[in-house]
Structures are given as C-alpha cells and as structure tokens.
Image: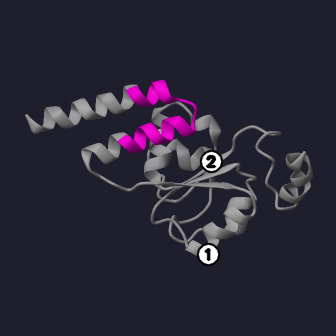
C-alpha cells in the first residue's frame, strides 16, 4: 500500500518505482561499467560517467552523466534510474544525497585495488546485477590471474 502511495511522488522526480519498472542502472565509475559489460549485463545500464572508457561502446551506447566527481542530479535523474552504482569518490556528496532523496537506490562500490578488493567488487556488482554465477566465474579468473602474476 505504501509503495502505491509513494509511486506518484517518485514519478514526479522522473524515477519509476522499482517494483513497477525494469531495473535501470547508472554507473558512476569506469570500473563499474567495465564489470557490468564483462558480466554481460550492459542491458541494465542507462547511463555511464565520462570515465567509462572501456569497453569503447559504453560511451557510444549509453547516456553520459558527466565526470564521476562532478555529477549532476538533473542529468542522472533524467534517465529515471532505479539504482546509482557509484565508486566511493563519486560526487559531489550533496548531489549523490539529492539523487538518493529522489528515490534512487545509491550503492557505493569500493575502490580497493588489492587482489581481494578487486574480486570482492566483481562479486558485489554481480549480485546487484543478478549475475552472481557469472561474477563468481569472472572473480575466479581474476584471482587466478593475480596468482599467475605472483609466480
């Protein structure tokens, strides 16, 4: 009942209610975009930031929401996302807060570049994108690659 009552308020901000619409992700961080493409879940992406240089088609196929540390709430909200996946340094903080207040689920993704951090990031994004099995396989390949580099 609350979801039905809240839907008009969310639509006023251009954000569909998550239960009534497909998942629509905006990636604020090139690493997030790259992982979503590697998992084959680019179909969920409606927008990417200007650091999303790989794969090259991301900037051609998806709306550009600007630089990861200088996001515009209006630019992000105009895409009617259900989720904003943002690296820890994405911002400015007031913009991210405004996006969240508009009803978009904001998920902060760690920027830990250690072996463990990279694998954890892949698994986290895979879980969000309903691709846990593919993420586990990708994380295992990345971990094997790190192990090979050590040898």
Residue 118 vs residue 42: left or right? left
Residue 63 vs residue 134: left or right? right
Q: Which residues are magenta?
A: 120-136
Point 43% across, 37% down: residue: 123
**How far, Cα to Cα, is label 2 from label 1?**
24 Å
Point 45% across, 66% down: residue: 89
Q: Is residue 36 above or below residue 6?
A: above
Point 73% across, 60% down: residue: 77
Residue 116 vs residue 31: left or right? left
Badge 2, how many Cα within 10 Å: few under 14, some, many 20+? some
Q: Residue at label 2?
A: 62
Residue 91 vs residue 6: left or right? left
Point 58% across, 64% down: residue: 66
Task: Classify mark 2: helix, strand or loop.
Answer: loop
The part of the image, by quadrant, that contains residue 137 is: top left
Q: Residue at label 1?
A: 94
């Amino acid at each position: 009942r609350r979801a039905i009552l809240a839907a008009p308020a969310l639509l006023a901000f251009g954000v569909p209610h998550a239960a009534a619409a497909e998942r629509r992700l905006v990636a604020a961080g090139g690493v997030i975009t790259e992982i979503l493409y590697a998992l084959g879940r680019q179909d969920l992406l409606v927008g990417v930031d200007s650091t999303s240089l790989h794969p090259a088609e991301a900037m051609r196929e998806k709306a550009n929401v600007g630089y990861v540390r200088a996001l515009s709430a209006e630019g992000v909200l105009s895409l009617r996302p259900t989720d904003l996946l943002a690296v820890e340094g994405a911002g400015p903080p007031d913009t991210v807060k405004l996006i969240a207040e508009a009803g978009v689920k904001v998920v902060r993704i760690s920027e830990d570049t250690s072996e463990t951090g990279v694998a954890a990031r892949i698994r986290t994004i895979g879980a969000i994108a309903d691709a846990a099995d593919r993420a586990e396989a990708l994380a295992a390949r990345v971990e094997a690659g790190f192990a090979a580099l050590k040898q």
